[in-house]
Amino acid sequence: MKSDTHPEYRAVVFQDTSAGTSFLTRSTIETRESIVWEDGNEYPLAKVEISSESHPFYTGQMKIVDTAGRVERFEKRYGRRKKLDS
């Protein structure tokens, strides 16, 4: 078998920027940032916009995540969205 063909599988902290929550799991994702976790160890940090804490499928609530004004451009072009009733 060739050596150095697989990425490093290690503990990584994922931070949901829209919900403000974080969780520690294992991943091969490459990151530039790191964070000190609750156990006092330093882990690589991966910031995500949506996780199970903020995704409408898991929360049951509709939430619009705007990245770089895309929602405003869409609404300007096609009109405002209708809100979904629960």
Image (cartoon, rainbow, N blue to C red):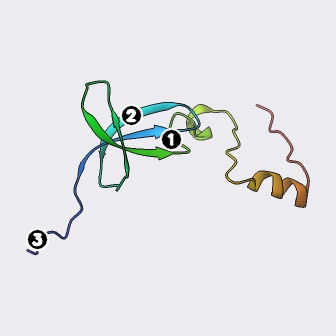
The image quadrant where one finds the N terminus is: bottom left
Tag 1 residue: 51
10 Å crowding of disc 3: few (<14), some (14-19), many (20+) = few
77, above or below 21, in the image:
below
Residue drawn where x is 15% and y is 69% of the image: 4
Outermost residue, left direction? 1
Of the residues shown, which amino acid type is indicated by label 2?
A: Phe
Q: Nearer the viewer, residue 65 or 52?
A: 65
Tag 2 residue: 23
Please state the horizontal and vertical placement of residue 61, each as a whole percent of the image. Answer: 67, 33
10 Å crowding of disc 2: few (<14), some (14-19), many (20+) = few
Residue drawn where x is 56% and y is 45% of the image: 49
For numbered disc 3, what is the local secondary structure? loop
Labels 1 and 3 touching (C-beta < 8 A): no
Res 63 → quadrant: top right
Of the residues shown, which amino acid type is indicated by label 1?
A: Ser
Please state the horizontal and vertical placement of residue 39, each as a whole percent of the image. Answer: 26, 25
Q: CA distance from mark 1 to mark 2?
A: 10 Å
Please state the horizontal and vertical placement of residue 79, each as a whole percent of the image. Answer: 91, 53
Tag 3 residue: 3
40, above or below 33, in the image:
above
Of the residues shown, which amino acid type is indicated by label 3?
A: Ser
Numbered circles on residues, count = 3
For numbered disc 1, what is the local secondary structure? loop
